[in-house]
Image: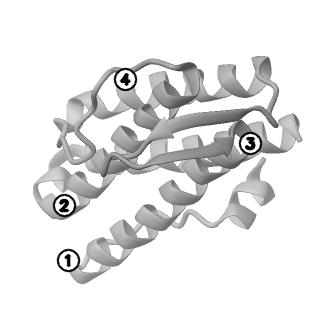
Amino acid sequence: MKEHLKDLLEYSHHFNTLLIKKFNDGDLHLAIPESTLRLFSHILNAQKIWNFRIEGDDQKVDVWKVYHKEDLMEIENENFERSVSICERSDLNKKISYTNSKGEQYQNSIHEILFHIVNHSTYHRGQIAAELRKSGLEPVVSDYIFYKREN
């Protein structure tokens, strides 16, 4: 299970990295809709929040904070490394208790949370692709099967 989750985290990291490169691609960054940066920043913030929850770190992160394009890669790399480290060193069946943004208490296993991180990122990358298409830009194709064909 650990290897599969690490593979999914690597898949997500791969396409997040390609998307960041697109955001910072010469003058193309001038045409990228602001809504895509907001959605991508949300992906990063959510992963950071879930990593903190798993590790019992109560740092507060604004889930809708928008980052500068130049800062995205550093945050992405930090999130990825932290999530992979959690995967490698944790009992994936261990239940984590946490409070959501509405103050409600929940429990989920580390496995469920790590899968959620990947799934959540995939969902929002799809929204970003739609936004790019509406703006006349070619989106990053981020299907898992394309990743597996290349790797």
Q: Where residue 93 sits in the image (x, y, percent)?
A: 82, 37
The residue type indicated by label 2 comes to Ile
Among numbered discs 1 and 3, the one appearing first in the sequence:
3
User: N-terminal of the two: label 4 or label 2?
Assistant: 2
- State the image coordinates of residue 19 (x, y, percent, origin top left): 40, 51
- The first of marks 3 and 4 along the sequence is 4
Element under disc 4: helix
As measured in the structure, the alpha-carbon distance from the residue carrying label 1 to the one carrying label 2 is: 8 Å
Disc 1 and disc 3: Cα gap in Å?
Answer: 37 Å
Q: Residues within 10 Å of mark 4 (few under 14, many from 20)?
A: few
- Of marks 4 and 1, which one's residue comes earlier in the chain? 4
Q: Give the mark nearest the N terminus, 1 or 2.
A: 2
Mark 1 burial class by Cα count in 10 Å: few <14, some 14-19, many 20+: few
Question: Label 2, on which residue?
Answer: 32
Residue at label 1?
Answer: 135
Residue type at numbered disc 3: His
* Nearer to us: label 2 or label 3: 3
Q: Residues within 10 Å of mark 3 (few under 14, many from 20)?
A: some
Q: Residue at x 53, y 67 (%)?
A: 141
The amino acid pointed to by label 4 is Glu
Q: Residue at x 31, y 79 (%)?
A: 133
- In this rendering, would 7 be left or right of 99? right
Dot in front, 3 or 4: 3
Vertical order, 61 against 142 (above or below)? above
Q: Residue at x 53, y 50 (%)?
A: 15
**Label located before the other in sequence (2 or 3):** 2
Could you tell me how far apart the alpha carbons at marks 4 and 2 are, in whole angstroms?
20 Å
The residue pinned by badge 4 equals 74
Front label number (4 vs 2): 4
Residue mark closest to the camera, 1 vs 3: 3
The dot on residue 111 is 3
Position of residue 80 measured from the top left corner of the image (x, y, whole percent) = 55, 30
